[in-house]
Each structure stands twice: as C-alpha cells, then as structure tokens.
Image: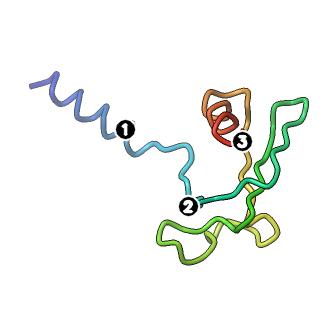
Amino acid sequence: MKLMNRIVITVMIIGLNNLAQAKGVAYKATVVDVRIDHTGHGFIKFKEPLKDAHNSSIPDCTQEAYSNMLAFDVNTAGGKAVMAIAL
C-alpha cells in the first residue's frame, strides 16, 4: 500500500508541476522566418498569428507585436525539436 501511495503522489507531483504551459497553437502554420543567434536562442515567425486552443484569438500572455512568433532555445532537447520541425 505504501508503494502505491508513493507512485500516486509521484505522478501527481509530475503532472501538477509544469514548468511551461503552451498557450498558442499553430494550426496549418506557414513559416516565414527562422532565426537562431550564437547563444542558441531563436524564434520562428509565422505568416498568421498564433491562436488559442479554440482557434479564436491570441493568448492573453502574448503581446500583439509578437503574436506571430514562437521563441525557443536549441541548447535544450525541446528547442532542438522545435528547430527541426520548423526547418
């Protein structure tokens, strides 16, 4: 029973402890530009603004000037995956 409790608590901690939550979605996105600087930080510029999950508007956390951009870091595994998909 103790083992089951530990497993459940571990899964709950992992599930509730999200370091980042995606708010923007790029459905049928057309990539206009990809830029990566010498530090490994980069961005992808899309033709259309990113939408929320319901495809209605830009997320609240997004500034209007950057509504069609997605930032990433190629020094991480996730950033390398984003770069590979964009290119």
Q: Which residue is mark 1?
A: 13
Please tell me which residue is depicted at 70% across the width and 36% down the height of the picture.
83
Q: Residue at x 64, y 65 (%)?
A: 50
Can you say whether 54 is above or below 73 in the image? below
Q: Position of residue 30 (x, y in %)?
A: 69, 57
Give the residue at the far top of this rendering. 3
In the displayed orientation, state which residue is furthest to the bottom. Answer: 56
Circle on res. 46: none
Identify which residue is drawn at 47% across, 72% down: 54
- Residue 40: % across, % down: 81, 31
Q: Tag 1's secondary structure?
A: helix
Point out residue 82 in the picture as x, y percentages from the top left corner: 65, 39
Q: Quadrant of residue 41?
A: top right
Instruction: Give left or right: position of 72 versus 7.
Output: right
Q: Which of the numbered marks, if any, corresponds to residue 27?
A: 2
The residue nearer to you, when weighing 1 against 52, is 52
Q: Earlier in the sequence, mark 1 or mark 3?
A: 1
Between marks 2 and 3 in the image, the one whose residue lies nearer the viewer: 2
- Vertical comparison of 5 with 69: above or below: above
Cβ atoms under marks 1 and 3 closer than 8 Å: no
- What residue did someone put label 3 on? 72
Position of the N terminus by quadrant: top left
- Kindly identify the amino acid type of the residue bearing the numbered disc 3: Phe
